[in-house]
Amino acid sequence: MLRVGVVGAAGRMGRTVLEAVQEAPDLELVCAIDPAAAGEDLSELLDGPSPHLAVADGLDALLSSSADVAVEFASPAGVGERLEWYASNGVHAVVGTTGIPPAVLRRAEALFARSAANAVVAPNFALGAALLVRFCELAAPVMDGVEIVELHHDQKVDAPSGTALYTAERIVAAREAGGAGPFAPDPTSALALEGARGGAGPGGIRVHAVRLPGLVAHQEVVFGAAGQALTIRHDSFDRRSFMPGVLLAVRSVAGRPGLTVGLLALLER
């Protein structure tokens, strides 16, 4: 049975992960870590049945509880140091923290390449979102233009989402692999409102971020070509939608040497 610790346990995603781990027959929840709720019993965080575990305030609880895998949905502040800790201490990591800078990921890749531990980092753990990226890779070389609209709840602190940026990166890579070259540059030269065309992401792809109450996580990718358009959309209506992907990563990470980015590699085994 895999022993799992949850980092960022008091957050909305952290609580959902706690419940999912408890429900999985092959996983054992052995520690919960969150400085914001340190000392509280898990029963104070969760609605349903929970083991009598006190929330810890530091990563050392992963060692004292002999956790095999850490699942992290925490603040992006300090994520580089946490990734270094996992690699240095031999604890496999499944990381859904958003807004990780590319330089931090590059350093983590080097750290896990020489560590006994492995890591899976994904901007979005919904299996449907991973499939959306794969469908976009298929469309990218044969369509003439694309824009990305991502929509999230109004408490999300980063924009655009990591999922949108990752999608744009994969679209650019797919065009290069297919010999299609870059998309034509945006010809817009007069803006009545600054930012009306969104931000220029990888490959100059325009990315638009929407933040509204009631939303969870949604992404629409619109491709265009002469006389046609192709829209690929994924919607997460509840945080439970991310749990199958999280559990897949928890069960797979020990067999994925080094750092794996995104769920597609796990789906294409």
Image: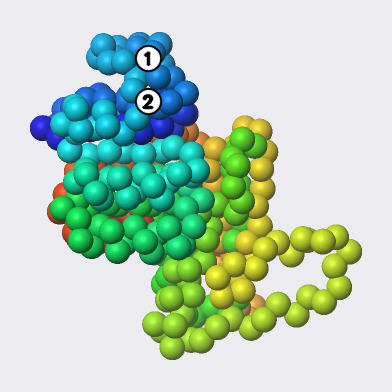
**Disc nearer the start of the sequence (2/1):** 1
Q: Using the image as rendered, state which of residue 191 and residue 57 is in the foreground.
A: 57
The quarter in which the N terminus is drawn is top left
Q: Using the image as rendered, state which of residue 22 and residue 62 is in the foreground.
A: 62
The residue indicated by pointer 2 is 57
Within 10 angstroms of label 1, few (less than 14), some, or many (20 or more) residues?
Answer: some
Q: In this view, does 22 lie above or below 190?
A: above
Quadrant of residue 2 within the rendered picture: top left
Q: Where is residue 64 in the image (x, y as percent from the top left)?
A: 19, 27
Q: Is residue 30 above or below residue 239?
A: above
Number of dots carrying numbers: 2
The residue indicated by pointer 1 is 39
Q: Is residue 113 above or below residue 77?
A: below
The kind of secondary structure element at disc 2 is: loop
The quarter in which the C terminus is drawn is bottom left
Q: Can residue 70 be seen in this view?
A: yes
How is colour applied across the structure in the image?
rainbow
Say which residue appears at 41% left-offset and 50% top-offset.
80
Say which residue appears at 20% left-offset and 33% top-offset.
63
Q: Give the amino acid at mark 1.
A: Gly
Q: Position of residue 130 (x, y in %)?
A: 39, 55
